[in-house]
């Protein structure tokens, strides 16, 4: 069974086999971040693992559209109730509604 840090790096496409000081520092930071996320999710009684929470947030898409010669409009996809719960549990502000594009 892979360790949490290996799961985090696998999802990022990183290989820890190199063993460089940079990889070790990155691995240490990733482990601290993973534990912090797990603790905050647990404290908020979400029932989510860090992996599931990140899967929820990975569904958020950034859009930039331009119609004809008009000015480009940028924003993110509408934040679901579940995604808003993850943001809240982690103590992160979700994007304001003015930046959420409901038609895309």
Image: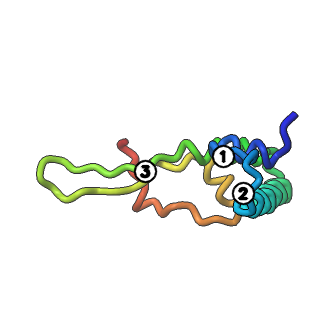
Image-based side of 90 in relation to 98, left or right: right
Other-residue count near label 2 (Cα within 10 Å), few / some / many at <14 / 14–19 / ≥20: some
Q: Nearer the viewer, residue 90 or 85?
A: 90
Q: Which residue is mark 2?
A: 23
Residue 49, x across and y down, in percent: 79, 45
Other-residue count near label 3 (Cα within 10 Å), few / some / many at <14 / 14–19 / ≥20: few
- Say whether disc 3 or disc 2 marks the residue closer to the N-terminus: 2
Residue at horizontal 88%, vertical 33%? Answer: 1
Other-residue count near label 1 (Cα within 10 Å), few / some / many at <14 / 14–19 / ≥20: some
User: In the rendered view of the protein, which quadrant contains the C terminus?
Assistant: top left
Q: Which residue is mark 1?
A: 14
Q: Which residue is mark 3?
A: 62
Residue at horizontal 67%, vertical 53%? Answer: 85
User: How many callouts does the rendering have?
Assistant: 3
Q: Secondary structure at mark 1?
A: loop
Q: Nearer the viewer, residue 20 or 52?
A: 20
Asked if the residues shown at circle 2 and circle 1 are in contact, with their CB atoms under 8 angstroms apart, the answer is yes
């Amino acid at each position: 069974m892979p360790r949490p840090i290996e799961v985090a790096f696998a999802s990022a496409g990183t290989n820890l086999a190199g063993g460089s000081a940079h990889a070790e520092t990155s691995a240490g930071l990733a482990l601290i971040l993973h534990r912090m996320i797990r603790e905050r999710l647990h404290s908020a009684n979400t029932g989510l693992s860090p992996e599931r929470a990140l899967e929820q947030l990975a569904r958020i898409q950034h859009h930039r559209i331009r119609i004809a010669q008009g000015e480009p409009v940028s924003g993110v996809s509408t934040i679901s109730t579940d995604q808003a719960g993850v943001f809240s549990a982690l103590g992160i502000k979700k994007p304001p509604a003015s930046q959420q594009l409901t038609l895309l």
